[in-house]
Image: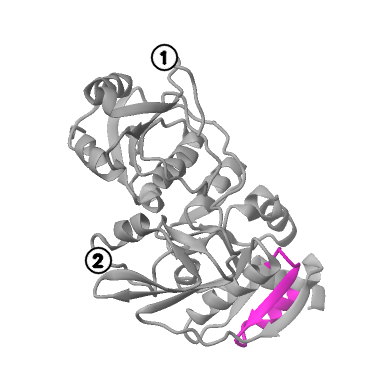
Amino acid sequence: MTKATSMNSRLDAAVMVVHGPEIFDCGDVGRFMRLLSPSRTIVAGVMARTAAEESGLPVEFDGRPPSRVILAQSEPVYLANRGKTQKSGRIFGDIVASRLIDRGLVQLECSNHTVYCWNNGDIHLAAALSHFTGYDLQEVNNTPHREGDVRAIRGCIPGEAVYVNGIIIGRATSDVVVIGSDKGTLTPISGLDPKPHGIEKISRNGCPDLSTAWCKSGAIRSVAPRNDGYALQVGRILVIDHCGHEIYARLQKDCCGILAVGDDTTAVCGHICTHRGIPVLGIVDGDRDAIVPCAFAPGSVVVETLGERDDDVGSEIAGRVPDEPLVWSDWVDGILEYLKDRVRVVIDTRVDSDDAVHTV
């Protein structure tokens, strides 16, 4: 067997785990699938799924973190990623590698055209990826990470939003944000200009396990979604209350619309649901942090509360979502009539509405 044939065989048997929307939006995944012919391509993450669905590429979806997806594979596997910067791309690989116990990691990093072979990972697979992509090959070891009640979110850009499980907790003031958990409350330690309302939201039911929480800084996605689908006119309404990262796990085929509570949750739900044509009724109070481009499917309405918190109004409206199929447009009209002058409409994409269409 020639060296080239051996490399081809190694790649053909390998699974490509893909992280993040940018790698789809920039066309990297399609190119890798043609060039490297992975045996399977598995997409990890929430916004990556939206970009993947829009791409039309034949991929699989797994909502678990990349490290858990990788550990579940028995075949050779590599992680494909495009970090927002070259530094953050390597930092992301470092974090994933640290969670793979004794298993090494091969990372195909598009931000700096590098194949990282972490912690004595599969060097033959890494060499094959380097050969066929033309990327540089680097053998590296991950740095120790502090676990437990403290979490460092690295690769931040000062001024950008920082969030935990989809909830904005503040803005970065340095390239490393350190947070902790104290008696069930999320606590900023360093590098963060905190957003008290966000910290209150994330701590409301007890601070999540910081070692496994979905932590990120910056925009979730920079590309606006396409409207490729049409929603059911009659169906069930899904309530998403400050947990936009859970939407794919909870979305069912009979969903005719989403009640989204919270500014950033409404933005995420609107972005994701635009692709599927599912309308959103968003309850916001005006503290949006612009983590995704604003987009909503036809039939969507976003209202801003006047003198009340979105949490309280959202909880009240969630109690008016029946556990049975209904007509989306009729329900939205009824809710707007119920709320009256307690809110103002800031976005309205209903086709037959007399209200102007606004953007926020």
Kindly identify the residue that appears in the image at 78 percent across and 65 percent down: 133
Asked if the magenta segment contains residue 111, the reply would be yes
Marks 2/1: CA distance? 41 Å
Asked if the magenta segment contains residue 310, the reply would be no
Which amino acid type is marked by label 2? Gly
Q: Is residue 47 above or below residue 92?
A: above
Residue 353 image label: 1
Percent position of residue 29, x then y: 66, 54
Using a 10 Å C-alpha cutoff, classify the residue at mark 1 as few (fewer than 14 neighbours), some (14 to 19) or many (20 or more): few
Which amino acid type is marked by label 1? Ser
Can the viewer see residue 220? yes
Q: Is residue 187 left or right of residue 6?
A: left
Where, by quadrant of the figure, is residue 213 drawn?
bottom left
Q: Is residue 178 above or below residue 56?
A: below
Kindly identify the residue that appears in the image at 64 percent across and 51 percent down: 24
Where, by quadrant of the figure, is residue 112 drawn?
bottom right
Closest to the observer, 141 or 292: 292
Q: Is residue 25 above or below residue 302?
A: below
* Mark 2, residue position: 206
Kindly identify the residue that appears in the image at 49 percent across and 84 percent down: 145
Percent position of residue 222, x then y: 61, 47
Can the viewer see residue 125? no
Q: Secondary structure at mark 1?
A: loop
Q: Is residue 158 above or below residue 331?
A: below
Tell me the quadrant of the picture where the N terminus can be found: bottom right
Percent position of residue 223, x then y: 62, 44
Q: Is residue 336 left or right of residue 232?
A: left
Residue 100 image label: none
**What residue range appears in magenta?**
109-128
Closest to the observer, 320 or 31: 320
Colouring style: one colour
Using a 10 Å C-alpha cutoff, classify the residue at mark 2 as few (fewer than 14 neighbours), some (14 to 19) or many (20 or more): some
